[in-house]
C-alpha cells in the first residue's frame, strides 16, 4: 500500500499554512486538547513508547530527553525548538515551518506541557526571514483562537511560543550554542555536563528539540505510540523527511518511512526520479555534510538511523547529497572545509586552527601544488581534531577529509602526481582562485 | 607607572591589537516605531535577561541605517543595559550584521556543496565579472554588494542567492546578466522568491 505522508501531505496546496486548513484537514490542535486531558508524565511515556528519535542529527530518543528534564526545581523550564537548519544539504524544517506551521506550534505546546514549561522559543536561522514571517503570523492566529496564551482549553495550562531570529552562524544549531545565542551571546558551545536538561537556557532545565521532531508529537498523541512505531523498522519508526539534493532529476523534500532505501530515494519516480542527465552515481552523502560518504554498492541500505550507521555512515539530518561522476573528491573536501573553516566558532583550538589548516592543505592539493606527504598530513590533522572539541563540530569538520581519503585516496594521489586537478568539471569555477579564496 | 610621551614603548614592545573598530557613524537612536518594536520584543524574555534581545536590537539598527556602526552599538548597549563590549562581541560574530555600509542589494550567493554542484562557483564568477568586484566588495554605483555565504537551507533549489531578506532560486550562471538587469530595473520584484509555494503545482 502506498505510504500516505503525515507531516507534508498538504504542503503543496496553496493554503496549507493557514489555521483553517490545519483545523479542517489535520485534526488541528486535537492533539493538544487530548494531551491537556492527560497527565504530563503520560505524554512523556507515550512519546517514549513510540520510539521517536530526534530528527536534528543525533537520533536521540525524544521521550528520554524529556524525562531527563529536571522536575523538582522552582526554576522555570523551557522548550527550545531548533530551527537553525544549517547543516549543508538539509532543508526539511524549512518546508514544515513555511507550509505547515501549526503542526510545529502544536508540537511546541504539547512539549511544554509534557516537561512543565510555559515558554517555547523557536530559534530560527536569520536567513529564513520569509519563513519567520509566515510562522509569526500563524502564531498570532493561534493566540487569537486560544490555542496559545493563558488557560488553554480551560485546562489552566499557559503557554507562550516566541520566534527568536538568529543571525548567520551554523554553530548556533548545536544545542548549547543555541542556548548561548538565545541568551544574547556568541553561539559557542558549553562544556557538558551539565546538560541542558539540568541547566540550559538561563541555567534552567531545558529541552532542545528539532522542528521535525516536534512536528511528530501531535500525530503520536492522536494516533498512538504503536501506530508510530509500526511505520518503520524496529527502533526507527514514524514518518521521516528526506532532503535530496545535488545531481538528481528532481531534488526536493520527500516524506517516507525508514524502510525506504537510498536507491529508491534517488531513482524512484516517487522521489528524486533518477540521476541528472543519466550520469552515473559516484557517491552519496546520506545525512548532511558532516557524515561519511557511501558508495553505489551500498544503495540498498534502508535510510534508517540504524541501517545507515551499520553501513558506515550516519542518517544525521537526512540531507542526502547525490554526487555524479563529474565530482572531484579533493574539490568536494575543499568545498566542505571552506564551510567548516568559516563556521567554526573559534572556541576550541583543534577545530579553529585544524579546520583552517585542513582547508589550506586541500587547496594546495586541489590546485596541483600538493606533495605526497600532504595526504598523510591531511589524515593526521583531521584525526587529531576528532574527539578533541567541546561539541561535535570538530568531528563534523574532520569527516569530509577522512572519508574522501579513505574512499578515494587514488584521486588525491593523482592530483599530487599530475600537479593538477584530474577531474575538472564544467560546472566549477573557471578561475579556482576567485571562488573561495579570501 | 606612567609612560613618558617620548618613550618609545608602543610599536616595539607591546602587542598591537588587530581589532578592527566599526565605523563610528552618526549619533544613533531608533525611530519611534522601532523603539516600540524593541520595547515589545524585550518582554518576551525574563526581565533580568534583556540581553536575549540583542540580536533583534541589532537587526533594528541595520534596518534603520543599513549597517551596524560604533555609535549604534553604544546605543544598543544602553537599551539592553549591558556593556558596549558585549554588543560588539555579538555584532562581530554573526555574519548577517554588516559593520560598514553595503550596497542597496546585498547578493548573498550560496557557495556550499549542493549549490556548487549546480554552478554556484560560476554564478559568483559571472557576478564578479559583470560588476567588476570580488566577493566582499561593493560595486562603484553602490547598488550591489557581493558576498559568498554558506548553505542557505534550500539546496533543492540550487543555486540560491539571498538578496537582502528576499530569495532568488535556481539561478543558472548564464542568467546572471538578466538577473542583475532585473534588479536594476524592477528591484526586488525581479526575484523569484521562495519556490515552495508554487513548485509542482
Ligand atoms: C555543529 C552542530 C550543528 C547542529 N545544527 C543543527 C541544526 O541546524 N538543527 C538541528 O535541529 N540540530 C542541529 N544540531 C543538533 C543539535 O545539537 C541537537 O542535537 C538537536 O537540536 C536536538 O534535537 P533533536 O533531539 O530533536 O534532534 C547540530 C549539532 C552540531 C554539533
Ligand atoms: S548548499 Fe546552497 S542552499 Fe544548501
Image (cartoon, grey):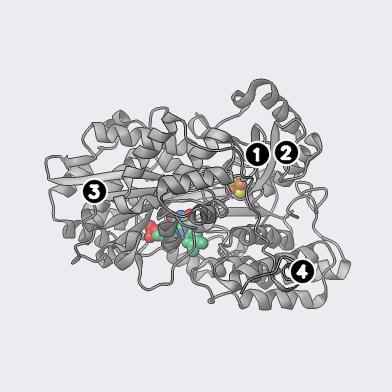
- Location of mark 1 (residue): B101
Query: What's the CA distance linking mark 4 and mark 2?
Result: 37 Å
Instruction: Judge depth for marks 1 and 4 and give the one in front.
Output: 1
Query: What's the CA distance linking mark 3 and mark 4?
Result: 52 Å
- Location of mark 4 (residue): A412
Q: Pointer 3 and pointer 1: residues touching (CB < 8 Å)?
A: no
The residue depicted at 26 percent of the width and 62 percent of the height is: A48
Q: Do callouts 3 and 1 point to residues on the same chain?
A: no
State the image coordinates of residue A273 (x, y, percent, origin top left): 57, 44
- Location of mark 2 (residue): B138
Query: What's the CA distance linking mark 1 and mark 4?
Result: 42 Å
State the image coordinates of residue A132 (x, y, percent, origin top left): 43, 39
Query: What's the CA distance linking mark 3 and mark 1?
Result: 54 Å
Regarding residue A271, the answer to whether it shows in the image is no
The residue depicted at 67 percent of the width and 35 percent of the height is: B103
Q: Is B190 above or below relative to A312?
A: above
Labelled disc at residue A134: none
- Location of mark 3 (residue): A223
Amino acid at each position: 500500500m502506498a505510504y500516505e505522508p503525515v507531516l507534508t501531505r498538504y504542503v503543496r496546496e496553496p493554503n496549507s499554512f493557514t489555521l483553517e486548513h490545519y483545523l479542517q484537514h489535520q485534526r488541528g490542535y486535537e492533539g493538544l486538547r487530548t494531551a491537556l486531558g492527560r497527565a504530563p508524565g503520560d505524554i512523556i511515556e507515550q512519546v517514549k513508547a513510540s520510539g521517536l528519535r530526534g530528527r536534528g542529527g543525533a537520533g536521540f530518543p525524544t521521550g528520554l530527553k524529556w524525562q531527563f528534564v529536571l522536575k523538582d526545581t522552582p526554576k522555570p523550564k523551557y522548550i527550545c525548538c531548533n530551527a537553525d537548519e544549517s547543516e549543508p544539504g538539509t532543508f526539511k524544517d524549512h518546508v514544515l515551518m513555511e507550509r505547515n506551521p501549526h503542526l510545529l506550534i502544536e508540537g511546541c505546546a504539547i512539549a511544554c506541557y509534557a516537561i512543565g514549561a510555559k515558554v517555547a522559543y523557536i530559534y530560527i536561522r536569520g536567513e529564513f526571514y520569509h519563513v519567520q514571517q509566515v510562522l509569526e503570523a500563524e502564531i498570532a492566529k493561534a493566540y487569537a483562537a486560544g490555542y496559545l496564551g493563558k488557560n488553554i482549553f480551560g485546562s489552566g495550562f499557559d503557554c507562550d511560543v516566541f520566534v527568536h531570529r538568529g543571525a548567520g552562524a551554523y554553530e548556533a544549531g548545536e544545542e548549547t550554542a543555541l542556548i548561548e545565542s538565545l541568551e544574547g551571546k556568541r553561539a559557542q558551545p558549553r562544556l557538558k555536563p551539565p546538560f541542558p536538561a539540568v541547566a540550559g537556557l538561563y541555567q534552567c532545565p531545558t529541552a532542545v528539540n528539532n522542528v521535525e521532531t516536534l512536528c511528530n508529537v501531535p500525530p503520536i498523541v492522536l494516533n498512538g505510540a504503536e501506530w508510530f512505531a509500526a511505520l518503520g523498522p524496529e527502533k526507527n519508526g514514524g514518518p521521516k523527511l528526506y532532503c535530496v539534493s545535488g545531481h538528481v532529476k528532481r531534488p526536493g523534500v520527500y516524506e517516507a518511512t525508514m524502510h525506504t532505501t537510498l536507491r529508491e530515494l534517488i531513482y524512484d519516480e516517487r522521489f528524486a526520479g533518477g540521476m541528472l542527465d543519466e550520469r552515473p552515481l559516484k557517491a552519496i552523502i546520506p545525512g548532511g555534510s558532516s557524515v561519511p560518504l557511501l558508495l553505489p554498492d551500498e544503495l540498498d541500505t534502508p535510510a534508517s538511523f540504524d541501517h545507515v550507521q551499520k553501513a558506515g555512515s550516519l542518517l544525521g539530518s537526512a540531507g542526502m547529497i547525490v554526487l555524479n561522476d563529474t565530482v572531484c573528491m579533493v574539490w568536494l573536501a575543499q568545498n566542505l572545509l571552506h564551510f567548516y573553516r568559516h563556521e567554526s566558532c573559534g572556541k576550541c583550538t583543534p577545530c579553529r586552527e585544524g579546520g583552517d589548516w585542513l582547508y589550506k592543505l586541500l587547496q594546495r592539493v586541489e590546485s596541483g601544488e600538493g606533495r605526497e606527504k600532504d595526504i598523510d598530513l591531511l589524515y593526521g590533522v583531521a584525526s587529531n581534531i576528532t574527539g578533541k572539541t567541546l561539541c561535535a563540530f570538530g568531528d563534523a569538520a574532520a569527516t569530509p577529509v577522512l572519508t574522501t581519503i579513505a574512499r578515494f585516496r587514488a584521486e588525491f594521489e593523482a592530483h599530487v602526481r599530475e600537479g593538477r586537478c584530474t577531474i575538472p568539471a564544467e560546472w566549477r569555477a573557471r578561475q579556482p582562485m576567485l571562488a573561495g579564496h579570501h | 607607572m606612567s609612560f613618558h610621551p617620548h618613550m618609545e614603548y608602543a610599536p616595539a614592545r607591546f602587542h598591537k591589537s588587530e581589532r578592527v573598530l566599526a565605523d563610528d557613524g552618526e549619533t544613533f537612536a531608533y525611530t519611534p516605531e522601532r523603539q516600540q518594536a524593541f520595547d515589545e520584543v524585550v518582554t518576551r524574555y525574563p526581565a533580568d535577561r534583556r540581553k536575549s534581545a540583542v540580536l533583534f536590537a541589532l537587526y533594528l539598527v541595520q534596518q534603520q541605517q543599513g549597517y551596524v556602526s560604533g555609535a549604534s552599538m553604544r546605543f544598543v548597549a544602553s537599551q539592553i543595559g549591558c556593556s558596549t563590549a558585549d554588543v560588539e562581541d555579538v555584532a562581530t560574530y554573526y555574519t548577517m550584521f554588516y559593520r560598514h555600509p553595503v550596497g542597496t542589494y546585498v547578493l548573498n550567493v550560496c557557495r556550499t556543496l549542493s549549490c556548487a554542484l549546480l554552478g554556484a562557483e560560476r554564478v559568483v564568477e559571472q557576478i564578479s565579472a559583470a560588476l567588476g568586484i570580488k566577493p566582499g566588495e561593493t560595486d562603484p554605483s553602490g547598488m550591489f554588494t557581493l558576498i559568498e555565504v554558506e548553505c542557505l537551507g534550500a539546496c533543492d533549489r540550487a543555486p540560491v542567492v539571498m538578496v537582502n531578506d528576499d530569495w532568488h532560486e535556481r539561478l543558472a550562471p548564464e542568467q546572471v546578466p538578466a538577473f542583475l538587469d532585473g534588479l536594476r530595473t524592477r528591484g526586488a520584484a525581479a526575484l523569484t522568491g521562495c519556490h515552495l509555494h508554487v513548485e509542482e503545482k
